[in-house]
Image (tube, rainbow, N blue to C red):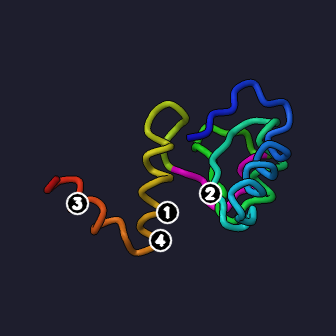
Amino acid sequence: DFLFQGAKNKLEVAKSLCNKLGIDLINVAYIGDDLNDFELLKSVGFSACPMNAPQYIKSEVSWILTKNGGEGAFREFSEKILSEMGIFEEILNKFLHF
């Protein structure tokens, strides 16, 4: 429902969206790998970066993924969140038996 392209300050965009949705940043999962992701990665509840992110990003995230950006990192992140929530198998089964 929301698409933000070319955002200069991703943290401010995320704060504004959270305000609109009535949630806190602590309830947000975010994956990033560059300087303009840095502040947002430090502010969310669940953060990750792809394996090929620079070390200054890796030092700030909850999870360093095993996949590189553009090679399945987002899927790995999504599946990890669903697994941590204990609902991955349920969602997978619903999709497979749709």
Q: Secondary structure at mark 1?
A: helix
Amino acid residing under circle 2: Ala
Cα separation, mark 2 vs mark 3, equals 23 Å
First of labels 1, 3 by sequence position? 1
Please indicate whether residue 4 sits to the left or right of residue 65 in the image.
right
Q: As drawn, which residue projects farthest toward the top?
A: 6
User: What percent of the width, then of the height, locates residue 8?
Assistant: 84, 30
| Image: 72 above or below 30 | above
Q: Residue at x 55, y 41 (%)?
A: 1
Report which residue position mark 1 lands on: 81
| Image: 86 above or below 78 | below
Nearer to me, 6 or 46: 6
Note whether residue 63 is visible.
yes
User: What percent of the width, then of the height, locates residue 52?
Assistant: 61, 37
Dots 2, 1 in contact, CB < 8 A: yes
Q: Secondary structure at mark 2?
A: strand
